[in-house]
Amino acid sequence: MNKKLATIALAGALSLPAFAAQFITIGTGGVTGVYYPTGGAICRMVNKQKKKTGIRCSVESTGGSVYNVNTIHQGELDFGISQSDTAYQAYNGIGKFKGKAIKELRSTMAIYPELLSFVVAKRSGIKTLMDVKGKRVNIDTPGSGTRMTTEIVLKAFGIKHSDLKQIDELSSSEGPTLLKDDHVDGYFAVFGHPTANIKDAANSVDIDLIPIEGKPVDMLVKKYPYYAKGIISGTFYKGVTHDTPSIGVKAVLVTSAKTSDKVVYTVVKTILDNFAAFKKLHPAYKTITKKSLLDGLSIPQHPGAVKAFKEAGIL
Ligand code: GLU
């Protein structure tokens, strides 16, 4: 090697980052939902800066919120997306998490709103939530946030499992196929809208979305700070031309108190710095603002996230 080449090789070696690459994984949901593309959008932005930050981000498709918070607790995921009601119950050790509080769970940003969606085949004749009695429905897996919220809402309406003709516990990702095969009359899913999942269903079966409203919803919204009312627009899905009122939560990027301030700060700062580009990555982000990322966090925020929001002048 001549002297010049040797110098270039040496300079190349010296310009390597002085820190070891750090790998982080975000737990999401089924691939046709909104968590999965959201994790993908975050990772793509974080990875664009990996030379500078040393952080490499990857996503994992999972069963959803409950799986994500439990797996963060086990130390096998660094971040996860979770419904705000799931995060609240997990942190406080109530409901499904009674006696199993995840005290180290922290929020970073509450990305976008999600609404409980009761997707039915028109042929089922279901017009209101109470019509679910005597029908076949999918209520998602125990690892999903959908399952948790669906159980809470059914209970508030006084609907028992024994009122249903058949209960399936498959992932909401299977919902469109279950409807198409006439295996169920409807399925529940807590999603941001519009979502590919319900578009798939609407493109293969005549579907309807059932309003979830009335006194039980008013009661839940009044009682729990993380529930809010919302509307699924009548413009999103083929064949559903009416607006559908429902009850919703926020999709929150959560992590553990054990995740370093630097990593959390980098992830949150990356999204805040590139917010206009981020917003364009999914139609479910249409109404979000940098400020709305702080609404509905439901559990304490990680100090790394607090630092990024403070620097951006939002906190
Ligand atoms: N909210 C859903 C759940 O936690 C997942 C939604 C999605 O994958 O977009 O079960």
Image (cartoon, grey):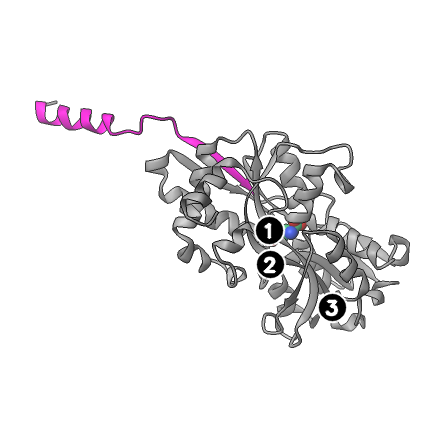
3 or 2: tag closer to the N-terminus: 2
User: Residue 254 placed where, x, y %?
Assistant: 57, 41
Q: What is the spatial separation of the Cα atoms under label 3 and label 2, in whole angstroms?
A: 16 Å
- Residue at point 46%, 58% (across, down): 279
Q: What is the spatial separation of the Cα atoms under label 3 and label 1, in whole angstroms?
A: 21 Å
- Residue at point 62%, 57% (across, down): 114
Q: Residues within 10 Å of mark 1 (few under 14, many from 20)?
A: many
The answer to whether the beta carbon of the residue marked 2 is less than 8 Å from any atom of ligand 1 is yes
Secondary structure at badge 1 equals strand
Q: Is residue 77 magenta?
A: no
Q: Nearer the viewer, mark 1 or mark 2?
A: 1
Q: What is the spatial separation of the Cα atoms under label 1 and label 2, in whole angstroms?
A: 8 Å
Secondary structure at badge 2 equals loop
The answer to whether the beta carbon of the residue marked 1 is less than 8 Å from any atom of ligand 1 is yes
1 or 2: tag closer to the N-terminus: 2
Residue 212 visible within the image? yes
Q: Is residue 17 magenta?
A: yes
Residue type at the position of mark 3: Pro
The residue to which callout 1 is attached is 251
The residue to which callout 3 is attached is 211
The residue to which callout 2 is attached is 192
Please report the bounds of the magenta region as a residue range: 2-27
3 or 1: tag closer to the N-terminus: 3
